[in-house]
Amino acid sequence: MSLTLTQHTFQRGETRLSSVLLLLLILAISWLLWSGLYKPLVMSLGALSCLLSVYLAHRMGFFRHHTNLLRLMPRLPGYWLWLLREIIISSLDVAKLILKPSMPISPTVVVLEAEAKTDVGQVILGNSITLSPGTVTLDLHEGKILIHCLTSESAKELQKGEANRRVAALEPR
């Protein structure tokens, strides 16, 4: 099982050496900046972890979608800020529910049609929903997302489609 990285043309499913090297460079720089330890043993373990991460990314098919990922990178910080705000709001709502003696929950399962057309966009939407307390993505199939919500109010909020629109806006036009 070796990575085949030489002389690939850019087609869906094939890996370009430049993409692999770019990911390796990003991982290595991130690791160096965040670790702050520059001893030989630690640096060699860091290099090994970066190489292993690139290998696993290749095995999981990351590079099949890398062009979509690179195109949405500039839009991600704004989305992350919005998502963080939504997670905080959801956390407070769930805390209020838990602290009420009557525990007024109304578990609901809803199906949401993803506006995102790419696999990457649909996965981002599903993961974003799961990150918000009180909601869990149960299934994603052919653009339909099955979601469990702790309350019917959170289900209605999801069906309004703000998260769906924001994720769709991340995708390249």
Image (cartoon, rainbow, N blue to C red):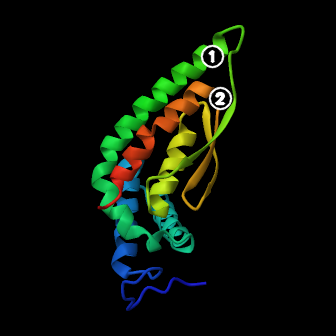
Q: What residue type is labelled 1?
A: Leu
Decide which of 76, 139 is in the foreground and name it: 139
Quadrant showing the N terminus: bottom right
Q: Which amino acid does label 2 sit on?
A: Leu
Q: Where is residue 144 in the image (x, y as percent from the top left)?
A: 58, 54
Decide which of 44, 169 is in the foreground and name it: 169
At 51% from the left edge and 73% from the top edge, which residue is drawn? 58
Q: Is residue 107 above or below residue 21?
A: above
The CA distance from mark 2 to mark 1 is 10 Å
Q: In this view, does 169 lie to the left or right of 142?
A: left
Within-10-Å neighbours for mark 1: few <14, some 14–19, many 20+: some
Q: Which mark is residue 97?
A: 1
The quadrant in which residue 93 appears is top right
Q: Where is residue 107 in the image (x, y as percent from the top left)?
A: 69, 29
At 51% from the left edge and 82% from the top edge, which residue is drawn? 3
Q: Position of residue 96 (x, y in %)?
A: 59, 14
Q: What element carries label 1?
A: helix
Q: Which mark is residue 150?
A: 2
At 36% from the left edge and 88% from the top edge, which residue is drawn? 9
At 54% from the left edge and 39% from the top edge, which residue is drawn? 131
| Badge 2 or badge 1: first in the primary sequence | 1
Q: Can residue 70 be seen in this snapshot?
A: yes
Q: Residue 66 carries which label?
A: none
Q: Is residue 65 above or below residue 109?
A: below
Q: Residue furthest right?
A: 102
Within-10-Å neighbours for mark 2: few <14, some 14–19, many 20+: many
Image marks 2 and 1: residues in contact by CB distance under 8 Å? yes
Decide which of 55, 62 is in the foreground and name it: 62
